Amino acid sequence: MIKKNISFFLVAGLVVAIMLFSLSNYIFKKILNSSVIATNITQYVDKNYAEGGVDVKLTDFTEFDWDRALVFNYPTSAKEISDVLHVNYDKSLDLISGIIFVKSDKITYDEIFKNDYESPPRFFIYPHRDINAQPKYKVFTRDNAVFECERKEYKYHNCYVLIPRVNTESTVEVKFYYLSQENPYFGIEDLKFKTENISVANMSADTIKFMKKDSDVQINKIWYEGNRLCVDLNENERAKLDAGSTAGEIITNILLKTFSSYPNVKEIEILIDGERGSYGNHFNFEEVFKVNGGE
């Protein structure tokens, strides 16, 4: 009888041990899988690191399919992510940053990088080279999702920081349109332009400056969402657009003609003070404008 009891407890103990092992293995895999991008990149960087950093192309570290990737830093809301990617994203984003991959407007993978305000994060991706730039997110395509990775030592571990790769010396040619009021009965035909070579690294800031100076159009910010260029106008522009049918038409054309000369733009979306789909008596931004045969 005693031997049977011992055998029973041995078998039961073995079963429990197997279950605990399976559970711990499952939890470990979940943790590992939840940081697969960070893990693969840090391993690659450690193996190939050289003075000055290592270039990291996201397509080399993603086995799943995707056409756009959104890198976001805190504070970014789930609504902002949903609007930018045209998906329903409802996860809690309290004090966290991360990256979300989509294919045909469906999320294929996302990964979170938790912020630690007592020490530098072990792995972090910035959406802009200027880490203080707004908005705190940016959409990348498979072609331009290339980053510079810098590895820094912190106490007992390394920290890995990625920023978008760009040739800061390269420039693009942009045509800035403005209204020549030599004709007292001015109209669309009186729009003129001047060509400026602006730095890729400062393209948004330089454009905002030129538009204010030459066209008296105030812009809050400019950003890409894949091949869509989003232009957020200052709230003051609403009254100007609605000053009359000619005013609304002229300002709209200045915006569309100027930003059509931006590189890799197939669509232009115009917002007013962060509001999408704005419209008035003499302007309508409810629809996205197609550029150069954009589908």
Image (tube, rainbow, N blue to C red):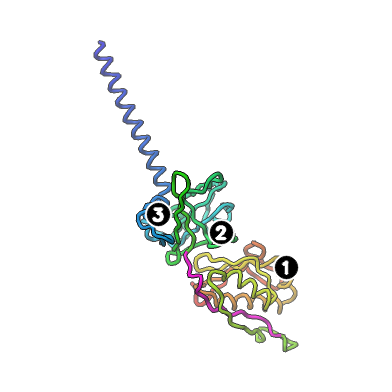
Q: Residue at x 37, y 52 (%)?
A: 43
Spot occupied by residue 187 in the image (x, y as percentages of width and height): 69, 84
Q: Residue at x 53, y 46 (%)?
A: 119
Q: Which mark is residue 41?
A: 3
Quick one: label 3, few (<14), some, or many (20+) residues within 10 Å?
some
Which image quadrant: the N terminus?
top left
Magenta residue span = 165-180
Q: Nearer the viewer, mark 3 or mark 1?
A: 3
Q: Mark 3: which amino acid? A: Ile
Q: Mark 2: which amino acid? A: Ile
Determine if residue 109 is in view: yes
Is residue 29 depicted above or below 42 in this figure?
A: above
Q: Mark 1: which amino acid? A: Asn
Q: Which residue is mark 1?
A: 236
Asked whether disc 2 touches disc 3, contact meaning CB atoms under 8 Å apart, the reply is no
Between residues 290 and 123, which one lies in front from this camera angle?
A: 123
Is residue 236 depicted above or below 188 in this figure?
A: above
Q: Which residue is mark 2?
A: 131
